[in-house]
Image (cartoon, coloured by chain):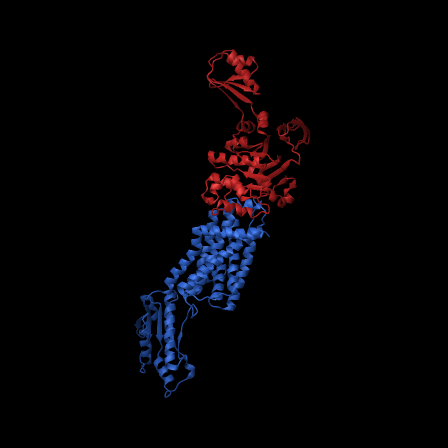
Chain colours: A blue, B red
């Protein structure tokens, strides 16, 4: 094993990479800009008021508890409350007014609270908690996530005042995202997956088409370096690149959006497997499409739709069912979900599940890629 | 002159042909009329041979790209493989470099069969592939260091930079170099392991005349340093200027081989002594009577074919003694372009097909 060459190749690769402003931009700045732009769009930065529909179905309440709760809501400066009368269609109103969330206070809410607090009234423990209904527009996760966190905060405070913390008031919601996570938590792992995919696929394509056209592969054939050493050295470089871009993305995510990440062994396993997976994919493309420009287009034709269909920018359950089925065969979907579960949700079972798919994809694609790549000419 | 017996591939009759080493002689079978060629190999002893090629063949579908060619390259010489585009030059050199797999034949480099021992030979050869383009964002020095790191035996990078006259460019990025300098760097890369044999595949294609000259000087310098150079080119001036030995390839066959002098003597029309603006009548007859092959050309000039340079003095002496008046004279000998035209009926610069 020519370790001197492998180390030399790594540093030469990094040097060339740093000197190519375009490549550095697409590898680092592009994902950073995506995070900043998408984060700003979806996280609702700034001091704006977010409109919310409040529909009180408990209009006959005489206890004052319902009124007091609504009063508490109106004091939250971030909320712009639109009151909707009982009997009016909430969904239609939300759609007409372009409002992303609605809070429904059920009939008997005030009476139930009074019954719970005042021992003079009969009360059934099994009725707890008294749930409000939060209707969220799944296409506007940024506003929804802020509304959700405000409502959860108000409910928490109310519970604290009424019972000292026991969960008397609750909220029901059909949500596509976990309750404690925000859009940026969902988004950053997707950007990491996307960035590794594009840099690996295009990096491989460059090695297999440009280097072939430029005679570098022909030259290497006549030099004392094996294909294994060459591929190993290139993979080492690509892995370093993957980790550089991953950590830059994470640093921006943490600094700009307060992202909380959990970095464990599976995070590294996933980054490494993903790098091998998409390098293999690039080698396969480079084998069948030999012209450099055509290969770039072929790379784009494969990575671009995958970027949108694999749940990089939006949760899959917001997409039509047939597209959700398509995602199940896309390697990037398993990468994205694996990274989310490993570094954000800390769900070990799901991490293992998705990582297993990524590793299998990586082994299959990389082996096929290496076998298909040949240096010799016909 | 040597004799060679060959068997007619159609009727099996044994035929005898004669020629000089390096000749390719056309032969027709008297029994069945089958036409063919007999190659008289120029023999180089194995000890002196840097490269030996025997019956090398390459076929792409129905196209025979290289047709059972054989030749040897002596150690320390510049061997030019001359032919038009598509003649089979690059296919041949890439088979020798083990980049392409031959359909048949044997190749030895420094006495070793490349089929079994190419890994042992890699340290001893350096190549500049056709249309080679190195890493754009490495400097000249970094590029040389990169390729040098592949080898155990390394030449001094400073030494290569000095020898290739790249001192002023060593810190420039490859992408910022002119075409000529890029080719010079390409040659420099092929020297990082201090090889015995250097393969240069069309090193000056696409360069302007000045840059081409610069690369020629670099190649001439390699020969002076005792390197064996295998050069493929379609520029006859390049072969004439640089080569110790030339093999002309056409449609996959070597049609002539030898030094420039040998090729001209064997296939050329000798030299032409041309008398311009001759005002004396009967000059052609005078020269014919003295045994010269003289004739009047379409533009009125008198051309005299001469086989030996000593005959120039004889012609000048006749012109003086016969008081023949003339404007100017020039002497031009046959070149490779004319030889190629004579052998193939096509111009070297016009391509193979």
Please report the residue visible at 53 percent of the width from the left and 49 percent of the height from the top.
Answer: A287
Residue B65 is situated, as x and y percent measured from the top left of the image, at 57, 38
Q: Nearer the viewer, residue A319 or B10?
A: A319
Residue A260 is situated, as x and y percent measured from the top left of the image, at 44, 67
The reply, left or right, for residue A332 in relation to residue A50 is right
Image position of B176 with respect to A233: above or below: above
Is residue B353 visible in this depiction of the protein?
Answer: no
Residue B266 is situated, as x and y percent measured from the top left of the image, at 59, 25
Q: Nearer the viewer, residue A332 or A45?
A: A45
Image position of A43 with respect to A151: above or below: above
Image position of A91 with respect to B45: above or below: below
Q: Quadrant of the C terminus of chain A?
A: top right
Q: Nearer the viewer, residue A242 or A179?
A: A242
Is residue A207 visible in this depiction of the protein?
Answer: yes
| Residue found at the far bottom of this picture | A120
Figure label count: 0
């Amino acid at each position: 094993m020519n370790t001197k060459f492998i180390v030399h190749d790594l540093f030469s690769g990094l040097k060339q990479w740093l000197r190519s402003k375009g490549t550095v931009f697409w590898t680092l700045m592009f994902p950073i800009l995506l995070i900043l732009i998408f984060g700003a769009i979806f996280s609702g930065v700034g001091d704006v008021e977010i409109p919310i529909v409040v529909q009180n179905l408990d209009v006959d309440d005489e206890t004052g508890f319902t009124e007091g709760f609504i009063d508490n809501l109106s004091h939250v400066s971030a909320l712009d409350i639109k009151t909707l009368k009982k009997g009016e269609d909430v969904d239609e109103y939300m759609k007409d007014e372009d409002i992303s969330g609605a809070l429904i206070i059920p009939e008997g809410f005030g009476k139930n609270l009074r019954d719970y607090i005042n021992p003079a009234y009969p009360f059934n423990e099994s009725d707890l908690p008294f749930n409000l209904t939060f209707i969220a527009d799944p296409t506007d996760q940024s506003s929804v996530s802020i509304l959700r966190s405000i409502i959860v905060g108000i409910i928490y405070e109310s519970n604290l005042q009424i019972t000292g913390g026991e969960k008397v008031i609750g909220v029901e919601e059909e949500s596509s995202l976990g309750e404690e996570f925000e859009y940026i938590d969902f988004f950053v792992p997707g950007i990491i997956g996307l960035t590794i995919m594009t840099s690996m696929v295009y990096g491989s394509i460059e090695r297999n088409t440009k280097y072939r056209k430029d005679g570098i592969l022909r030259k290497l054939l006549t030099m004392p370096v094996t294909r294994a050493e060459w591929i190993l050295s290139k993979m080492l470089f690509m892995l370093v690149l993957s980790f550089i871009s991953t950590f830059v993305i994470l640093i921006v995510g943490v600094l700009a959006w307060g992202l909380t990440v959990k970095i464990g062994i599976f995070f590294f396993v996933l980054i490494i497997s993903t790098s091998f997976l998409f390098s293999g994919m690039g080698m396969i493309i480079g084998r069948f499409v030999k012209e450099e420009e055509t290969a770039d287009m072929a790379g784009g034709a494969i990575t671009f739709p995958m970027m949108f269909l694999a749940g990089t920018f939006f949760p899959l359950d917001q997409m039509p069912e047939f597209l959700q089925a398509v995602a199940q065969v896309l390697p990037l979907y398993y990468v994205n979900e694996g990274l989310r579960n490993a570094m954000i949700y800390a769900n070990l079972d799901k991490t293992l599940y998705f990582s297993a798919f990524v590793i299998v994809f990586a082994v299959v694609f990389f082996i096929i890629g290496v076998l298909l790549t040949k240096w010799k000419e016909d | 002159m040597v004799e060679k017996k060959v068997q007619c591939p159609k009727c099996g009759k044994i035929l005898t042909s004669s020629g000089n080493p390096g000749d390719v002689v056309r032969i027709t079978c008297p029994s069945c009329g089958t036409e063919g060629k007999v190659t008289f190999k120029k023999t180089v002893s194995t000890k002196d041979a840097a490269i030996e090629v025997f019956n090398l063949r390459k076929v792409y579908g129905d196209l025979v790209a290289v047709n059972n060619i054989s030749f040897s390259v002596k150690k320390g010489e510049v061997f030019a493989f001359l032919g038009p585009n598509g003649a089979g030059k690059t296919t041949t050199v890439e088979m020798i470099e083990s980049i392409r797999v031959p359909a048949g034949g044997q190749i030895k480099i420094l006495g070793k069969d490349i089929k079994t021992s190419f890994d042992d030979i890699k340290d001893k050869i350096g190549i500049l592939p056709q249309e080679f383009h190195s890493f754009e964002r490495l400097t000249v020095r970094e590029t040389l260091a990169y390729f040098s790191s592949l080898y155990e035996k390394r030449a001094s990078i400073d030494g290569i930079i000095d020898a290739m006259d790249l001192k002023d460019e060593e810190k420039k990025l490859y992408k910022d170099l002119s075409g000529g300098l890029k080719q010079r760097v390409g040659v420099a890369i092929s020297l990082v392991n201090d090889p015995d044999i250097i393969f240069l595949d069309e090193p000056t294609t696409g360069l302007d005349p000045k840059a081409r000259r610069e690369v020629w000087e670099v190649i001439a310098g390699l020969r002076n340093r005792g390197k064996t150079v295998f050069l493929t080119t379609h520029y006859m001036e390049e072969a004439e200027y640089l080569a110790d030995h030339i093999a002309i390839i056409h449609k996959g066959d070597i049609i002539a081989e030898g030094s420039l002098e040998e090729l001209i003597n064997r296939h050329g029309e000798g030299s032409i002594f041309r008398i311009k603006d001759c005002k004396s009548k009967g000059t052609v007859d005078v020269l014919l009577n003295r045994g010269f092959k003289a004739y009047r050309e379409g533009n009125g000039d008198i051309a005299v074919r001469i086989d030996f340079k000593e005959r120039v003095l004889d012609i000048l002496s006749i012109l003086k003694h016969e008081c023949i008046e003339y404007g100017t004279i020039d002497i031009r000998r046959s070149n490779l372009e004319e030889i190629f035209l004579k052998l193939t009926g096509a111009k070297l610069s016009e391509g193979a097909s």
